[in-house]
Amino acid sequence: MTAEAPVVGVSAGAAVHAAAERLRAAKSPSPRLDAELLVGHVLDRDRAWLLAHEDAPLAADAASRLAGLVERRAAGEPVAYLRGFKEWYGLTLRTDRRALIPRPETELLVDVAVAETTRRLAADDRLITVWDVGTGSGAVAVALARRFRTALALGRIHLVASDVSPDALELAAENLASYGVDRLVALQVSDLLDSVGAEAAPPDIVVANLPYVPQRDVDAGAGSLAWEPRAALDGGPDGLDIVRRLLTRLPDRLAADGLAYLEIGVGQAAAVEAAVGLLPGSWSCSITTDLAGHERIVTVSRIP
């Protein structure tokens, strides 16, 4: 730490100021927010409490922990990894380097999946199979399991969460267990939808937040990209290699009246639409924009 680093005897407010100055000097993109989150973390308090108790003192152990965390953040390590959790979609999810940190953009993926699942539950009594492909930390699976806990327990919905990474699935299992929904979700090691037929029925609804960052951006390693697992980020030259692979599996593995929701990056919608146009048979493709107006979710389904 620099001379401005928090020391024993300083107040929480002074510690935030000193930490923010250190992170600002290190070119952190959000130094004040990061400082507040880290000071709150060592005090085991949220930001609202911290802002109302700026005179609260830091004990020696808290000051020592804060110094280490600030230096790690100054080196670029994401706050979500430093704290070990991330607030997302009203949840508090464990986070570490086994999986991608949940992003705000992915909350829209949950919203569209919830709306379609709710519509199908109301339409008839058929079993609905929902498949979260590339579950990572299990964020989407946890959100869906909590929303449809009763329908899952009654056997109206079968929810599968898969990932090619066993390490990521371990983290997903921990997050599911922390919300008491681990017995309601089937976790599978699977490359995309490869276990359909052998281990699971064709899905009615597919939700997928697959790697879609262009390789050059992953190589540059800006921000958290240098710390998160490359396999969860790298989508090849244009970011869509794995998305295209999933699309090619839909004709054989999606239920006849099923649909798939795919999260994409800014500027990728046209390329995904072109890939859908190459699938055998007739398919529809629509785009949902996020709150920032960016094309974010591609919905793919067969045309009857």
Image: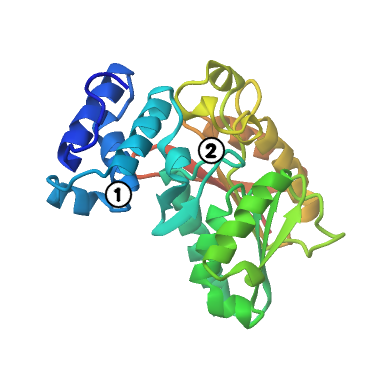
Question: Mark 2 or mark 1, which has the lower sequence index?
Answer: 1
Please tell me whether mark 1 sits on a helix, a strand or a loop: helix
Q: Image quarter for residue 227?
A: top right
Residue at figure coordinates x 63%, y 83% from the top left: 154
Q: Position of residue 258 (x, y in %)?
A: 67, 60
Q: Which residue is mark 1?
A: 43
Q: Amino acid at mark 1?
A: Leu
Task: Tell me, yes or no, if residue 123 can be seen here.
Answer: no
Task: Tell me, yes or no, if residue 130 can be seen here.
Answer: yes
Front in this rendered view, residue 286 or 195: 195
Relative height, residue 191 to residue 253 (above, below)? above
Q: Amino acid at mark 2?
A: Ile
Q: Image quarter for residue 161?
A: bottom right
Q: Is label 2 in contact with label 1 (beta carbons under 8 Å)?
A: no
Q: Position of residue 30 (x, y in %)?
A: 29, 30
Identify the disc placed on residue 71. Answer: none
Residue at figure coordinates x 58%, y 44% from the top left: 209
Residue at figure coordinates x 52%, y 20% from the top left: 221
